[in-house]
Amino acid sequence: RAAWSRAYWKLRRRKQLNEVSRWLAYWHERWGIPLQLSIHAGVGRHRDFPGNDHTDPGDGFPFAYVIERARKIVAGKAK
């Protein structure tokens, strides 16, 4: 949800964040999508794309955590 805080995501939705990380790692390995926040070369949010009126996942979504975890999965260093 767009209104969820970073703390809420990390405390109450960690399993969901880890699943997103696994998907990003898969897409990186399968299609070479860079593990970085960028709509031109990487991962983007709905609101980053022109003409989109969606705001999810919102400012509280911990993209840095998710992308770093995806990098660790790819490197074989994730727990």
Image (tube, rainbow, N blue to C red):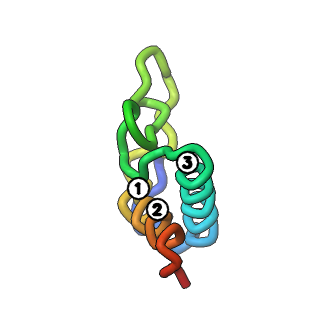
Secondary element at tag 1 = helix
Tag of residue 1: 3
Q: What residue type is labelled 2?
A: Val
Q: Which amino acid does label 1 sit on?
A: Phe
Q: Give the residue pinned by disc 1.
A: 63
Cα–Cα span, label 1 and label 3: 14 Å
Q: Give the residue pinned by disc 2.
A: 66
Mark 2 neighbour class, 10 Å CA radius: few under 14, some 14 to 19, many 20 or more: many
Q: Quadrant of residue 49?
A: top left
Point out residue 38 in the picture as x, y percentages from the top left corner.
Answer: 36, 39
In percent of the image, x 46 and y 14: which residue is there? 51
Mark 3 neighbour class, 10 Å CA radius: few under 14, some 14 to 19, many 20 or more: few
Q: Which amino acid does label 3 sit on?
A: Arg
Tag of residue 49: none
Q: Are marks 2 and 1 in contact (CB under 8 Å)?
A: yes
Mark 1 neighbour class, 10 Å CA radius: few under 14, some 14 to 19, many 20 or more: many
